[in-house]
């Protein structure tokens, strides 16, 4: 497996850091999850449960080792530093300054282990005027301008329903960690990876910044191509009260669909720039799509080269044949469900270990690797 032999100390909680280390663990890295005394990882106790475990916890803790360290104690700090001597990667997601106060920051670790790759994931990173501001996903989406793009019919921002800042932060941190590990092969030295989830969210907007960069103004959301301004990048109701989407504006797809539904007269209009000029096309398509059910339209598209997709609910999406074919829904031997790993290799594919660690289950075994002076449990 690609990351076999890589040892990761994961101090992070909730979603961005644990998601990152789950991706690494599925590809062979050893993940040592360091939980705080008391309740441990908070998501052990959050949300829906199946098989005696939180579904959220099941999807961010599989295959990991759990140890409990009190990092505020000298013994806990010393044990962590001794573990870091034997590690390749450290991941932490405290507020800036916390690891320095605890004496386990990059400078402290790298002085002992120059090969360490140390990733800090924070809402706003380690610098800037907002670095100490507490925030979860929706706050960073608000400050990154993303929430202003996700509007209801009245023009009011609504919940995006997907933790964009959390997951972009996770993916950028994964990229940074792997880059640093790759570079270490040539230099022999690790590095410090400073990830801001706010930065990561901004970086995912290259197709959204046209009016901002070209005309020094915010976008008029309902008139922009990606958010409803184009008739062929839009959501339409169907006869059964469900929805389909048109999801491509290339001329061939526009031409194919309008010809197939007998409205070739709208082709020239549908090739106009996004905005009010598309209103007549939208109205015509709305009437057309209300003549069949969602699933009838999906069957219809099989015989036509058009970009059309049904709007699935989340249950339908995870149980779709495409998700099954790509192993994105995994059922373990006990019948519990897991999200699959999206990073597919032809050689050495991911191998998901569905076992979940009990709180502190591996403390003694992991600390037993250390010198005798560091073996005591806090």
Image (cartoon, rainbow, N blue to C red):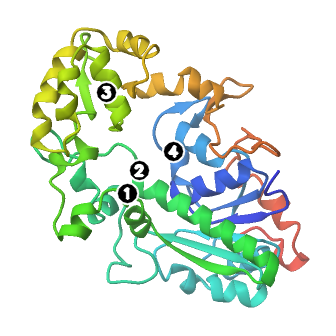
Give the vertical position of 257 relative to 60 (above or below): above
Q: Residue 252, position in %: x, y?
A: 37, 32
Q: How far apart in space, not on screen, are marks 2 and 3 (Cα)?
A: 36 Å
Give the vertical position of 9 relative to 349 (above or below): below
Residue drawn at point x = 32 percent, y = 38 percent: 249
Residue 255 marker: 3
Foreground label between 3 and 4 = 3
Decide which of tag 2 and tag 3 comes sooner along the chain: 2
Per the image, label 3 sits on a secondary structure element best described as: helix
Dots 2, 1 in contact, CB < 8 A: yes
Question: Label 4, on which residue?
Answer: 45
Q: How many marks?
A: 4
Q: How far apart in space, not on screen, are marks 3 and 4 (Cα)?
A: 52 Å
Q: Residue 303, position in %: x, y?
A: 45, 13
Q: In front: 377, or 363? A: 363
Q: Residues within 10 Å of mark 4 (few under 14, many from 20)?
A: some
Q: In front: 145, or 218? A: 218
């Amino acid at each position: 497996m690609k990351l076999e032999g890589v040892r990761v100390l994961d101090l992070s909680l909730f979603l961005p850091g644990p998601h990152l280390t789950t991706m690494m663990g599925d590809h062979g890295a050893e993940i040592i999850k360091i939980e705080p005394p008391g309740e441990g990882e908070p998501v052990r106790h959050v949300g829906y449960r199946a098989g005696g475990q939180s579904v959220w916890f099941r999807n961010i803790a599989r295959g990991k080792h759990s140890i409990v360290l009190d990092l505020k104690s000298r013994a806990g700090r010393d044990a962590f530093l001794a573990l870091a001597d034997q590690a390749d990667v450290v991941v932490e997601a405290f507020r800036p300054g916390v690891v320095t106060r605890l004496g386990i920051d990059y400078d402290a670790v790298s002085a002992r282990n120059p090969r360490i790759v140390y990733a800090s994931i924070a809402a706003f990173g380690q610098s800037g005027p907002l670095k100490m501001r507490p925030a979860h996903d929706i706050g960073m989406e608000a400050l990154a301008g993303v929430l202003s793009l996700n509007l209801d019919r009245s023009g009011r921002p609504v919940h995006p329903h997907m933790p964009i800042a959390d997951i972009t932060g996770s993916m950028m941190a994964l990229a940074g960690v792997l880059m640093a590990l790759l570079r270490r092969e040539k230099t022999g030295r690790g590095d410090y990876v400073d990830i801001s989830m706010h930065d990561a969210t901004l970086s995912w907007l290259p197709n959204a910044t046209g009016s901002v960069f070209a005309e020094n103004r915010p976008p008029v959301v309902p008139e922009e191509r990606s958010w409803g301004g184009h008739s062929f990048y839009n959501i339409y109701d169907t006869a059964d009260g469900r929805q389909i989407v048109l999801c491509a504006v290339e001329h061939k797809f526009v031409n194919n669909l309008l010809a197939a539904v007998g409205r070739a007269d709208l082709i020239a209009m549908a090739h106009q720039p996004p905005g009010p000029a598309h209103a007549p096309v939208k109205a015509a398509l709305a009437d057309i799509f209300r003549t069949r059910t969602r699933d009838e339209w999906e069957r219809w598209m099989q015989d036509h080269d058009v970009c059309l997709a049904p709007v699935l609910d989340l249950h339908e999406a995870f149980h779709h044949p495409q998700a099954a074919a790509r192993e994105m829904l995994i059922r373990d031997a006990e019948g519990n469900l897991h999200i699959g790993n999206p990073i597919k290799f032809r050689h050495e594919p991911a191998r998901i270990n569905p076992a979940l660690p009990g709180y502190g289950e591996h403390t003694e075994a992991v600390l037993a690797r250390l010198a005798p002076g560091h073996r005591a449990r806090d």
